[in-house]
Image: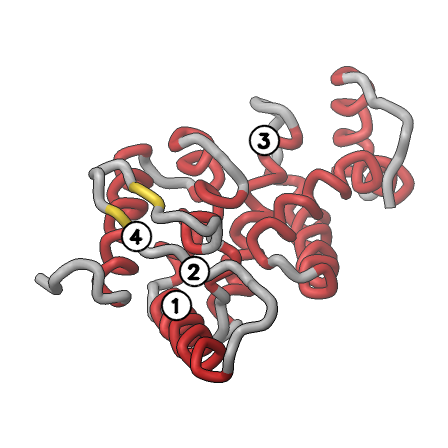
Amino acid sequence: MSDDTEITPEAERDLVRQAQTGNEDAFGVLMRSHYEPVFRLVQSMLRDEHSARDVCQEVWLTVWKNLGSFRGDAKFSTWLHPIATRRAIDHLRSRKRWFSRFIPFLSDGENAENSSGERYPAAPEPVVDRDPRQEMEIAERNARFERAIDALPPKHRAVLALREIQGLSYDEIAEHLGIARGTVMSRLFHARRLLAQKLGDLPCD
């Protein structure tokens, strides 16, 4: 669901104004022009195409209902993407499982280092011809990763996803979540520290 026609900023502002008056055709053009970037953002957090498509439907329903609140002070995408982020976070809160493979520093095959210089154990790389004992050890380790990630508060999982998967800067994460840059840095630090503690890499406070 994409539109190859690039919309100029002036044309987009006009489409927004028309859509705000209830023009569904104008809204359809807006949706088609922004659908794929929104989908990629949501999918980067959920890592599941079907769930991402469902969440995108919720995103665009929310946009339609709240379009009147968009004042045009910033780009439409700047207003749109935080809505998509919040809907993805809502979905994560309702979903009880979050797999370790979603976070690159737990699945890149090497120990990763955070901004404090602390090291985290990496999830094992898939290999062939493992013996049953190896398979059991790997399964147990993966289960431990899953439990550790699942135990993190949604707000901490959110900043991890936006930083580690989406690759957003601290300022961009702050804009998406509607929080201060310092709060982003704090949540990211605590998320990584909590994760390391739950994995037994660091002593609990």
- The residue carrying pointer 4 sits among few (fewer than 14), some (14 to 19) or many (20 or more) residues within 10 Å by Cα, namely many
The answer to which of marks 1 and 3 sits earlier in the sequence is 3
Amino acid at pointer 4: Tyr
In the image, farthest residue toward the left: 205
Residue 24 in the image: x percent, y percent? 87, 44
Q: In the displayed structure, does residue 101 sit left or right of residue 122?
A: right
Q: Which residue is mark 4?
A: 120
Q: Which residue is mark 2?
A: 123
Q: In the displayed structure, does residue 102 sit left or right of residue 10?
A: left
Q: Quadrant of residue 106?
A: bottom left
Secondary structure under tag 3 reads: helix
Q: Quadrant of residue 80?
A: top right
Q: Which residue is mark 1?
A: 145
Amino acid at pointer 3: Thr
Amino acid at pointer 2: Ala
The answer to which of marks 1 and 2 sits earlier in the sequence is 2
Q: In the displayed structure, does residue 161 sit left or right of residue 58?
A: left
Q: Which residue is mark 3?
A: 78
Amino acid at pointer 1: Phe
Q: Quadrant of residue 75?
A: top right
Residue 18 in the image: x percent, y percent? 82, 32
Q: How is the image coloured?
A: secondary structure
Split into 4 quadrants, where in the image is the C terminus?
Answer: bottom left
- The residue carrying pointer 1 sits among few (fewer than 14), some (14 to 19) or many (20 or more) residues within 10 Å by Cα, namely many
In this rendering, the answer to whether 116 lies above or below 120 is: above
Residue at 52 percent of width and 56 percent of height = 102
Q: CA distance from mark 1 to mark 2?
A: 8 Å
Q: Say if mark 1 contacts mark 2, CB within 8 Å.
A: yes
Q: CA distance from mark 1 to mark 3?
A: 34 Å
The answer to which of marks 3 and 2 sits earlier in the sequence is 3
